[in-house]
Image (spheres, rainbow, N blue to C red):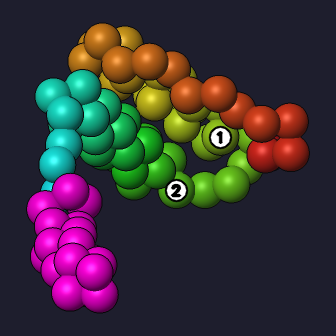
Amino acid sequence: MTRCIALAIFVIAALLPCIGRATTAQGIFTMRKWAASDKCAQAAQRAFPDYTAEALAKRDQALKRCLDSQNLPSREISPNEP
């Protein structure tokens, strides 16, 4: 009985890395969209690096244009962000 339990624990421990790597097509698709969205945000930040009200407005417009051009969902802005 003890051997069976030990064997079962060993098999489960051996399979854990494989289970963690299992991904779905939807997960891969979502990660690619997040990466593309992050690239849009980085490009907008590079284009308008200042933190003035005018630069922030232009940055938001550039981000929105980039997201729209790639058919990505818009980002929600929390009320605590400038």
Where the N terminus falls, by quadrant? bottom left
Asked where in the image residue 69 lies, by quadrant, the reply is: top left
Determine the residue positioned at 60% across, 56% down: 50
Give the structural element (helix, strand or loop) at label 2: loop
Asked where in the image residue 82 lies, by quadrant, the reply is: top right
Q: Is 22 drawn above or below residue 74 in the view shown?
A: below
* Disc 1: CA contacts within 10 A as few (<14), some (14-19) or many (>=20): some
Determine whether, in the image, residue 12 is placed left or right of residue 65: left
Earlier sequence position, callout 2 versus callout 1: 2
Asked where in the image residue 63 lies, by quadrant, the reply is: top left
* Disc 2: CA contacts within 10 A as few (<14), some (14-19) or many (>=20): few
Residue type pointed to by label 1: Leu
Residue 59 among those drawn in magenta = no
Residue type pointed to by label 2: Pro
Whether residue 76 can be seen here = yes
The answer to whether the residue labelled 2 contacts the one labelled 1, judged by CB atoms less than 8 Å apart, is no
Determine the residue positioned at 56% across, 28% down: 75
* Residue in front for this viewpoint, 27 or 77: 27
Q: Which residues are magenta?
A: 1-20
Query: Which residue is under mark 2?
Result: 49
Secondary structure mostly seen in the magenta stretch: helix
